């Protein structure tokens, strides 16, 4: 009789609700992956293992939400959907039980016979797993496997750190530590240009514009004439109105300039930057890419 009942497949159920406890039957290769998944989603789990004929051992998870889970007291639908989509993994819920027997039916299915009418036909102390396949067939495990708490199956090991002996450096005013500073692209908002680097042709254009500038502009612009290039500096005046030259931005309100939308990495304070041999505090320094 029990063999006949095991051949009857479950049927689709209507209006399936989320369970408080679910079971997942899978091959042992998926055990570690799902154990991490359950912990990451605040699910408590128990584990049972058993063999079916000559096949590899099966793993049966019993999962339920942790008491403080934000998803509530029911197993979330996204967890059930994830488990159902895995290969060689079938989700079950318990639909019938007595003092010695437990019947698990595939999630979303129902068994055609009432559990109370057929449980006596199976051996005492057994676990029934009824599914539509294709990963697993109907299984009767007797005696029923024992479930172990997931926390009891985890071994924690902390690596032993090595021991280093440090000795203070004496007789040195400064530590021999150098940090290379790089000029990198800055994805943030572009500041207003504080200076323009001009070539020879652009320098001639500036000479022509001088005659059209208002009188107070002569006290706000500074013009440094070089052999091949020139620099136009502005103090609080809109440099972006000149549609030529290489726009430069001021670093920390100092005499150090970098191209627009560029920054120094790491972002060091000016006290450390000014100690670099290439930067002289009294001179204008322009860093270009």
Image (spheres, rainbow, N blue to C red):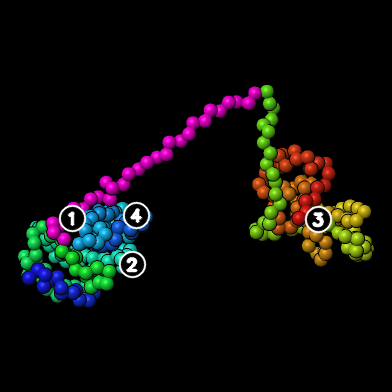
Q: Is residue 205 left or right of residue 160?
A: right
Mark 4 and mark 3: Cα distance apart in space: 61 Å
| Residue 284 sits inside the magenta stretch | no
Element type at mark 3: strand
Q: Viewer-proximal residue, 17 or 122?
A: 122
Between the C-alphas of marks 2 and 4, the distance is: 15 Å
Q: Position of residue 112 (x, y in %)?
A: 14, 75
Q: Earlier in the sequence, mark 3 or mark 2?
A: 2
Q: Residues within 10 Å of mark 1 (few under 14, many from 20)?
A: some
Which circle's residue, 4 or 3, is located before the other in the chain? 4
The question of residue 146 being in magenta is answered with yes
Does 172 sit left or right of 243 as displayed? left
| Res 210 → quadrant | bottom right
Would residue 78 be found to the left or right of residue 273 on screen?
Answer: left
At label 2, counting other C-alpha atoms closer than 10 Å, the crowd grade (few under 14, some 14-19, many 20 or more) is few
Residue that lies at the very extreme toward the top in this rendered image: 171
Q: Nearer the viewer, mark 4 or mark 3?
A: 4
Question: To which residue does mark 1 refer?
Answer: 145
Q: CA distance from mark 4 to mark 1?
A: 20 Å
Q: Which residue is mark 3?
A: 195
Gap in Å between the C-alphas at discs 1 and 3? 79 Å
| Cβ atoms at labels 2 and 4 below 8 Å apart | no
Q: Secondary structure at mark 4?
A: helix
Quadrant where the C terminus is found in the figure? bottom right
**Mark nearer the N terminus (1 vs 3):** 1
**In this orientation, which residue lies closer to the viewer: 249 or 179?**
179
Residue situated in front as seen by the camera: 21 or 237: 21
Q: Residues within 10 Å of mark 3 (few under 14, many from 20)?
A: many
Q: Secondary structure at mark 2?
A: loop
Residue topped by disc 2:
87
């Amino acid at each position: 009789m029990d063999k006949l009942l095991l051949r009857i497949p479950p049927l689709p159920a209507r209006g399936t609700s989320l369970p408080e406890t679910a079971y997942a039957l899978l091959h042992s290769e998926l055990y570690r992956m799902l154990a991490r998944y359950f912990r990451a989603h605040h699910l408590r789990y128990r584990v049972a293992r058993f063999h079916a004929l000559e096949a590899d051992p099966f793993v049966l998870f019993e999962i339920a939400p942790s008491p403080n889970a934000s998803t509530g007291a029911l197993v979330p639908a996204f967890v059930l959907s994830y488990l159902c989509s895995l290969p060689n993994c079938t989700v079950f819920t318990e639909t019938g039980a007595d003092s010695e027997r437990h019947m698990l039916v595939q999630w979303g299915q129902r068994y055609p016979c009432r559990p109370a009418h057929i449980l006596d036909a199976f051996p005492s102390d057994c676990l029934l797993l009824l599914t539509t396949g294709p990963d697993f067939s109907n299984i009767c495990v007797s005696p029923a496997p024992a479930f172990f708490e997931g926390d009891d199956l985890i071994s924690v090991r902390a690596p032993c750190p090595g021991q280093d002996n440090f000795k203070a450096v004496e007789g040195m005013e400064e530590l021999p530590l150098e940090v290379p500073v790089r000029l990198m692209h800055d994805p943030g908002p572009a500041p207003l240009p504080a200076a323009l680097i001009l070539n020879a042709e652009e320098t001639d254009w500036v000479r022509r514009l001088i005659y059209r500038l208002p009188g107070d502009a002569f006290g706000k612009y500074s013009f440094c004439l070089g052999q091949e290039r020139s620099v136009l500096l502005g103090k609080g005046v809109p440099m972006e109105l000149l549609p030529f030259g290489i726009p430069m931005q001021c670093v920390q309100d100092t005499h150090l300039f970098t191209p627009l939308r560029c920054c120094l990495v790491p972002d060091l304070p000016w006290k450390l930057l000014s100690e670099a041999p290439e930067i002289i505090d009294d001179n204008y320094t322009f860093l270009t890419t």
